[in-house]
Image (tube, helix red, strand yellow):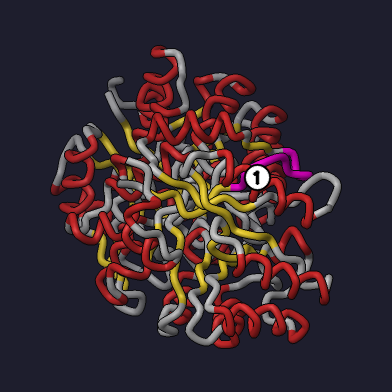
Amino acid sequence: MTIDSLVFLGSSRFGVELTAEALATGCREQDVSLSLASPPHPPDHDLRAANERILSAVDRSGGALLGLFRVDPWDAVESIETVERAAALPGIRGLLLHPAEEHFRINDPRVRPVADRAAALGLPVVVATGTPWQSEATQVAEFARWCGDAPVVMTNGGQYNISGLSQTDAEAALTLENVHLHTNGVYREDFLQRVVGEFGQDRLLFASGAPSFDVRYEKRRVELLHVDDGARDAVLAGNARRLFAIPDAEVPA
Amino acid sequence: MIVDMHMHIDDIPALGWHMSAAQCVAAMDEAGIDIAVAMTITDLPEVNPTAIELIADACAEFPGRLYAFARVHPWYQEEAVRLLRRAVTEHGFKGLKLHPVTTIAHPSGPDTIRLIRTAAELGVPTLFHCGDEPMTTPLAIAPAAAAVPEGTIILGHMGGYFHVDEAIAVAERYPNIVLETSAMPYPNKIKEAVERVGAERVIFGSDGPVCSPVLEKEKVGMAGLDPDDEARVLGGNAARLLGVAG
């Protein structure tokens, strides 16, 4: 079984798009049972409407989708309302914070109310990680401390550097037990293997990051890891099921 | 013939990185790669004064499988030029590797240009680390391609994560630029590169053995190239640049 822990469903103002049909086709071709979908930053900047489109897509998906609500911490009141609404909706399993596209620093004190509310509600938070000055792994680690026991997932291995220069920072963040990593776009597969070896198999989640990343390539990245089958299964699905509370009944056959 | 233009051999206790020739060849065998280019991660003459010998010995251990590039620090000026000449003329090295992250030598600065020009005189290409860091971006390297039009400039990683479009654009501008595919995570950009600059100027690399050569080779397949173009990208072009039978 494979669960894709992050796709961006819809049209982005930055020129990429993933339609429900294209996602369904990709999932069929790559044998992905379930995807967690966040909206991209929409062309009209209206995150509330974009979140509602995700909710509708989840409802129409026949169990193939669960949702993440995207939160803009600059909208102080609405951001907290969004967190609370996410927690109340069975089809929504967490939050997506994207510091680069919503233009904030993840450890800015003004983001803390979102973290505090997510922590109180036990909602997982996925953080688009790796942009300088906004979402460096060290900065996300500070945010993760605010989240208490709520899981925090750093996208793309916690860094964007094609020499792996920030992987040490990502590993430092993993010393916090609520921090996890997505596998997409990671430089050096031995980094993923080292995470499994040093921090345990329960800290990595397969994610494609589609449409910017390629689900075929990203899934093969995990399939080819030199880890045992139990660890691979955990990365491909088990860890997502645990973090996002996905029982057997919610996983399509 | 499958040729991997970008592999590493080094021993860096400070980083806990140990990449041996045997590891490279095992990874090549797993991926079905015939030949690979190996280079250190550390630079000549500092912090690795024995880098030539390290790579030369590794290639001698696996004749016909591994070929060598010399990673040299441009700041050492005439000493750097002498080391590159020695590597190529005495040890049969096939190219120059430059990594401005470890050297903080600007890719179009005079010290670097002197080395690229020497590589061109020796008939070997220059492989740059080309990613998202300052001094490694395609637009930072492009002036070097303009300054040494007789030299072949390979953009390793073809721009990394966020500079891939720029890498393709500078390759369109400068016919002596070649795009190398390692670790860059977008298979469709290989296809776009082939369509825009021609299959003869796109080459496969893995950045192995720690990046998966199997995955990186499959990535080229995912690009969906015409079979002849795929053969050029996976080996024909590199064989030509290295001067080995393709």
Q: Which is more toward the observer, A247 or A104?
A: A247
Q: Magenta stretch containing residue A230, yes or no?
A: no
* Mark 1 surroundings within 10 Å by alpha-carbon count, few (fewer than 14), some (14 through 19), many (20 or more): few
Q: Judge left or right: residue A161 versus residue B21.
A: right
Q: Is residue B77 visible?
A: no
The amino acid type, in three-letter code, at marker 1 is: Ser
Q: Position of residue B34 (x, y in %)?
A: 23, 32
Q: Please tell me which residue is depicted at 45% across the width and 81% down the height of the picture.
A: A172
Q: Nearer the viewer, residue B128 or B189?
A: B189
Rendering coords of residue B92 (x, y %):
30, 42
Magenta range is: A8-15
Residue B24 at x, y = what percent? Answer: 23, 49
B207 relative to B150 in the view: left or right: left
- Residue B204 figure quarter: top left
Is A14 contained in the magenta span?
A: yes
Q: Is residue A37 visible?
A: yes
Mark 1 lies on residue? A56
Chain letter of disc 1 in the image: A
For the residue pair A198 and A166, the one nearer the viewer reads as A198
